[in-house]
Image (cartoon, rainbow, N blue to C red):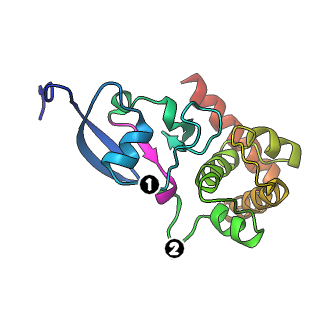
């Protein structure tokens, strides 16, 4: 509906979530988290602290991780959004999902989706070169369930698998990821 200004309170936009376009109307004050969960029914992304401190609501926006509780949905028109539902599937889990299972890195249902999204971003951004680097770049996801050592092992394993699939070493993949992240940040 080109030229439409929406209903009395809603504004039209297209959210591209997990590869599917959704034409919806949102109120200007609605967060991306609330639209994903309440309007689109994608409840994998969790509402934790609702103020950007815990990371439970982490999603990818144009390939970069964001706290969806601090992101207004109206500003994401036409952007590519990936939630934990789009990371992999039951039949074809993402490397990081397989690694979390293999290394017993799961926490409760609130923290795990955000941890998975941050772990995938950590690898893609090239910040999985060492345990210290993984801890630093995963530090935005807070949980008190004490599975951190398992998470670091899982991220390291998934980074190695991802690099091997691309025919690179983990160090080379890390350098390439950092370069891509810097180019994206500068764009």
Tell me if 138 is positioned left or right of 44 in this view: right
View extreme (bottom): residue: 91
Residue placed under numbered mark 1 in the picture: 43
Q: Residue at x 70, y 37 (%)?
A: 140
The x and y percentages for residue 78 are 33, 36
- Give the CA distance from mark 2 to mark 1: 16 Å
Q: Position of residue 171 (x, y in %)?
A: 82, 49
Question: Contact (CB < 8 A) between labels 2 and 1?
Answer: no
Residue 149's disc is none
> Earlier along the polypeptide chain: callout 2 or callout 1?
1
Q: Residue at x 36, y 31 (%)?
A: 30
Q: Nearer the viewer, mark 2 or mark 1?
A: 1
Q: Quadrant of residue 186?
A: top right
Q: Is residue 122 above or below residue 89?
A: above
Look at the picture and state if 24 lies above or below 43.
Answer: above
Q: Which range is magenta?
A: 78-85
Which residue is nearer to you in this view: 139 or 130?
139
Q: Secondary structure at mark 2?
A: loop
Q: Nearer the viewer, residue 169 or 37?
A: 37
Query: Which residue is pictured at 69% across the width and 70% down the height?
Result: 101
Question: Neighbour class for label 2 at 10 Å: few (<14), some, many (≥20)?
Answer: few
The mark found on residue 90 in the picture is 2
């Amino acid at each position: 509906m080109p030229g439409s200004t929406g209903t009395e309170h809603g504004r039209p936009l297209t959210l591209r979530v997990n590869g599917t376009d959704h034409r919806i109307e949102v109120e200007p004050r609605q967060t991306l988290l609330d639209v994903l969960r309440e309007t689109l029914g994608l409840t994998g992304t969790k509402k934790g602290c609702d103020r950007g401190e815990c990371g439970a609501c982490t999603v990818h926006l144009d390939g970069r991780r964001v706290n969806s509780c601090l992101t207004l949905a109206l500003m994401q028109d036409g952007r590519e959004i990936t939630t934990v539902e789009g990371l992999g599937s039951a039949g074809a889990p993402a490397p990081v999902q397989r690694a979390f299972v293999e290394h017993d890195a799961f926490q409760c249902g609130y923290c795990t989706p955000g941890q998975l999204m941050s772990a995938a971003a950590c690898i893609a951004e090239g910040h999985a070169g060492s345990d210290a680097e993984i801890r630093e770049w995963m530090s935005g996801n807070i949980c008190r369930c004490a599975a951190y050592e398992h998470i670091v092992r899982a991220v390291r394993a998934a980074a190695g698998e991802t690099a091997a699939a691309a025919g690179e070493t983990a160090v080379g993949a890390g350098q390439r990821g950092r370069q891509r992240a810097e180019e994206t940040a500068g764009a």
